Amino acid sequence: MPDKRFDAASLIETAYQNYGKEFKQLTDKEKYHVVSKAVMQHIIPQWLETETFFQEKKKAYYLSAEFLMGRALGNNLINLRIEDDVRQILQDMGASLARVESAEADAGLGNGGLGRLAACFLDSAATLGYPLIGYGIRYEYGIFRQQIINGEQVEEGDDWNAMTDPWALRRESERSLIQFGDQTVYAVPYDTPVIGYGGKTINTLRLFVAEPLKNFNFDDFNNGRYQEAVKEKNEAKNITRVLYPNDSTREGKILRLKQQYFFTSAALQDLVKKYKAAGRDFEDFFKYHAVQLNDTHPSVAVPELIRLLMKEGLDFSKAFDITQQTLAYTNHTILQEALEKWDIALFQEILPEVYAIIEKIQNKLTLELTQKRLTVDEIENLAIIDKKQKVLRMAYLAIYGTHSTNGVAQLHTDILKETELNNWYRVYPERFNNKTNGITQRRWFLKANPEMAAFVTELLGSDAWITDLTQLEGLTAFAGDDEVIARFMAIKQEKKRQLADFVKFNEGTTLDLDSIFDIQIKRLHEYKRQLMNAFHILDLYYRIKEKGETTSCKRTFIFGAKAAPGYFRAKGIIKFINEIKHLIDNDETVKKYLEVVFVENYNVSYAELLFPAADISEQISTTGKEASGTGNMKFMLNGAATIGTLDGANVEIVEEAGAENNFIFGLEIDQVEALRKTYKPKDYYNKVPGLKRVVDSLIDGTFSDDGTGAFQDLYESLLEGHTWEKPDSYFVLADFDAYRKAHNHVCDVWQEPMRFARMCFLNMAHAGKFSSDRTIHEYAQEIWNVEQM
Ligand SMILES: *Cc1c(COP(=O)(O)O)cnc(C)c1O
């Protein structure tokens, strides 16, 4: 535990040193800097202590192109258990902790679930005392800032002040050289502490910035070539300039490949250098390192580690074995367009040495499969170097070059084994395993919902759930206690009020606190089916408006979602939702029953306000498409019921909380696969009452897409398809009626407030399995073989 007390004097001192001012003269942003720097000083001894403790031991490394950390200050104060002290100290100095915390920009170095998972894992590992070091890229610009203008998404660069971030220390002396075919740069590490709950273990997130060998060419400048003088610097810095705002397809090819190799090589060089300095035998490398590849983005680690080990004198065969025993791979998707492939010619040009190693790996694979008596066709089917398509299949490289391949929820792992990666599973069944995702209850409950957290602690008579979420099971004993349920409802109401205040301030919309808060927040993608949600809202509109249907459920539908800037169809869906919002807002009758809000710039900090305020969690992906989902878990933990398909981790959520406490609907996995063969969306369009009406609204003049053609495109994607895609690939029309029925059921239950609240309460009580603490224990014990501090 840090022994130096955190006090007012340290803030005053830090303010003097950094700003030459009295603390109270500072702006909120400056106060945030000063408080953060003072916390940094406070934790240094324990940070060093952690490093020393693990010096001689095996450690795990998490290689990820994304870390969606959000804000640090509030979370760190909570984990250090000094939040109340700091609040008081600030109050005594006339400042507000809440305002100081709000001055921090989100570290948005990720797109969505995959990046946020990485952040939750770091928190859990530090809390549990496992040595886990994160390695990634310190993007100058994180995920873009989203504005909604005239109902459309407009992107803006996210200038999050990477270089003045008080939580990072530059480690110039530990930089490495990274060589591409046409360019050589430095990778300079920046270290951020990852403070476990209780402050005992403080791990590190190490993110690299690309820098030139030479910052400035004096001769060029002297001869008037001003652009030339800084060209090398700009080209180097471009590598870590911006996070690709794309979580489903591959884009910006060369730069993206350079980014992947850049951070992967930098991380592995870091490990090799330190290991060498410790003077150990490289044949034992795997006994000290477990490296987890978060999806295929760092899969170039396979040839790169082999290359580095060969430079240390090992032969290829030995280097391969050690690499395989060191690395493990997590698969995050089965979406075909997201399975990474690199053009061979391009790869060879950018990474010639690495490509030569991949050829050796391919030869070894071919030989191994031949010995296993696979046919020529079967061997070709498993090729890493796909000569026909002229691409490298990175997922195959990752499976072959590692000792473990895991999916992220049971259903996802089953699909990998039975279909998507069945060819590999048949050859190497022992490599495949499941690690169902999780979320950290520190950020997503203790920090985001302190009111409910305090209530839970009171009921359980202990706060042990903070580091052992299975304790929540003890809440089931209170489910029959009306007083407890009433207090649960009162807290939910308070969280709805807090969200409403923020939404009022941010979006200018007033929310009705007595309505059902029905929330869908996640990246905008066709498979996540925000469009189906929109169609249902429009159907409700017509039922109320034209059929005079009355309802005693007032519903508030809240959306938050960013669309990849080049994803035309996703942007069309954002516009469509906002057009529906506009229609309802301007209808005096209907707006009594319905409200739609599209929150601008959904990010981690907004998420912390949204999850605790939900009555209903929308998890409505086409079954088979959402590998796990983690938003679903955040809602559940905060006491919301799920309306959802049996997809990803929803399956396990329902197993834990009971189907009777959720609203499950729609095609199941086998039905989706069966229907795919004969599916005719027009049959549903013609037969399902009300469906034609809402689909036609895309093209019949009800709404305007401002001449972009986006609505026509959506319409055609549902009913006609194209040569490259079948109509309605995500079964929106097939599931619509079941979805509507599920919503009707929600409304029925809502009529009985205590019954509805009890369902929500029981979801919270059964959320224990979905702590990332459980997930990290599984990785540590079953894949990494590392021990706790
Ligand atoms: C949890 C989270 C996600 C992932 O949400 P899914 O519903 O699982 O896709 C994405 N973005 C943010 C900001 C999150 O907190």
Image (cartoon, rainbow, N blue to C red):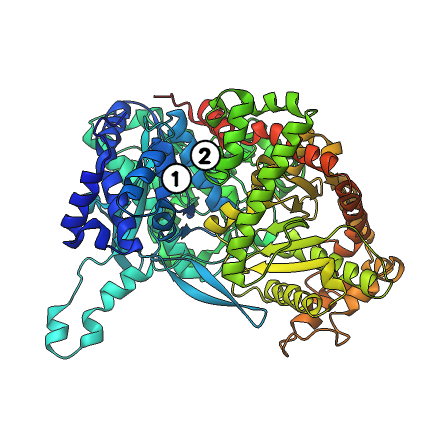
Residue 459, how many percent across, how many down? 56, 23
The count of marks equals 2
Q: Residue at x 62, y 54 (%)?
A: 558
Q: Which mark is residue 211?
A: none
Crowdedness near tag 1: few (<14), some (14–19) or many (≥20) residues, C-alpha within 10 Å = many
Determine whether 391 is above or below 67 in the image.
below
Type of amino acid under label 1:
Asn
- Closer to the camera, 778 or 469? 469
- Closer to the camera, 84 or 702? 84
Q: Which mark is residue 75?
A: 1
Residue 450, how many percent across, how many down? 48, 36
The answer, for residue 726, to whether it is visible in the render is: no
* Quarter of the figure with residue 654: top right
Q: Earlier in the sequence, mark 2 or mark 1?
A: 1
* Quarter of the figure with residue 47: top left
* Quarter of the figure with residue 312: top left
Residue 75, how many percent across, how many down? 39, 39
Crowdedness near tag 2: few (<14), some (14–19) or many (≥20) residues, C-alpha within 10 Å = many
> Marks 2/1: CA distance?
8 Å
Disc 2 and disc 1 in contact, CB within 8 angstroms: yes
Q: Quadrant of the C terminus?
A: top left
Type of amino acid under label 2:
Arg
Q: Secondary structure at mark 1?
A: helix
Q: Quadrant of the N terminus?
A: top left
Determine whether 236 is above or below 698 in the image.
above
The answer, for residue 588, to whether it is visible in the render is: yes
Q: Residue at x 16, y 53 (%)?
A: 21
Is residue 310 shown left or right of residue 494? left
Name the residue tied to disc 2: 442
Residue 689, how many percent across, how many down? 87, 59
- Closer to the camera, 330 or 193? 193
